[in-house]
Image: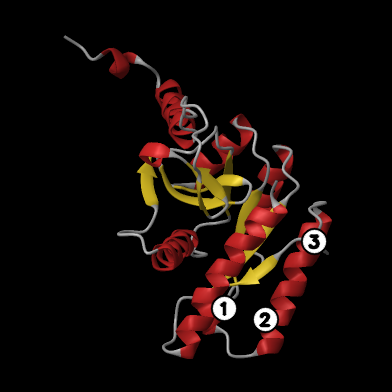
Amino acid sequence: MLNAGASKPPAVRKWAEYQSLHRQLRPPAPREAVPRRLTFVDGVPFGGMGQPAYPVRYTVVPLIGPDGVGKTSLLQALGGFLQQRDHLPAPPLRAASGALVLDTRGVNGVYQLVDFESAHAQSSLLAATPFQGALLAVSALDSVLPGTVESLMAARNAGITRIAVALTKCDQIADPEMLDLVMMEVRETLNKYECSGDTAPVVCVGAGGEGREAEKWWRASGQLLQAVQAWIP
């Protein structure tokens, strides 16, 4: 007997995958009542059985940008930061349908940073799903690329204006003036597409070094997470 899914056109099957990913990104809110005693974890109140004391707000933040700028490495670095900071047994990363998802809790609820497996999946989800904001990855070695502009245009077409920027591979740039020039170009590009380039957070991140250098980039990961949560409602 033929598989029922095999008879569907490729575009229909791909759309079903996107819908499956969207369902995985937003888990159902807990039904239990507010307990008498609450324990707070990163500002989120928890009750019995390790469940949130009341329905927690979920904010999905797509990680956008062209291939090769270090989006997956960035998400892994952020996961490593959370694992070390919160003493977790493993980084809070999970695989969804065609994406890698990082779950992090903050004062405003749970933020889910999503790295799509391809630029096509990224564009399709931006067009089909309403997002409050996005995190744009820009390589400090390459600055603004044509793919960077395409990602910004896709975000703007989806109605996204709150865009934070992670300037990746900063540990490979020795000249501070070079970083300043890249930052300036990033802000000018954001302004060009009406994304509040003068006030949007642009955070330098990296993954290299030892000792104090490694601690510097570890702290930068935390600063980026804080910037995302503060900038994207």
How far is mark 3 from mark 2, CA to CA?
Answer: 16 Å
Q: CA distance from mark 1 to mark 2?
A: 8 Å
**Mark 1 belongs to which amino acid?**
Cys
In which quadrant of the rendered image does the N terminus lie?
A: top left
Q: Are marks 3 and 1 in contact (CB under 8 Å)?
A: no
Tell whether label 2 touches label 1 (CB within 8 Å): yes
Where 211 sits versus 87, above or below? Answer: below
**Residue 101 appears anywhere in the view:** yes
The kind of residue on which mark 2 rests is Leu
Amino acid type, label 3: Gly
Which is nearer the eye, 105 or 184? 105
The mark that comes first in sequence, 1 or 2, is: 1
Q: Give the structural element (helix, strand or loop) at label 3.
A: loop
Question: In this rendering, is residue 222 above or below 135?
Answer: below
Q: Residue at x 69, y 37 (%)?
A: 158
Q: Which of the two labelled residues, at mark 3 and mark 2, occupies the earlier sequence position?
A: 2
The residue positioned farthest toward the top in the image shown:
1
Residue in view at x 39 percent, y 53 percent: 92
Q: Position of residue 61 (x, y in %)?
A: 58, 46
The quarter holding residue 47 reads: top left
Q: Which residue is mark 3?
A: 197
For this rendering, which residue is in front, 138 or 227?
227
Residue furthest out toward the left: 1
Q: Which mark is residue 179?
A: 2
Residue position marked by numbered label 1 in the rendering:
170
**Residue 80, how many percent across, how many down?**
40, 65
Circle 2 residues within 10 Å: few <14, some 14–19, many ≥20: some
Give the colour scheme of this rendering. Answer: secondary structure
Q: Quadrant of residue 138?
A: bottom right
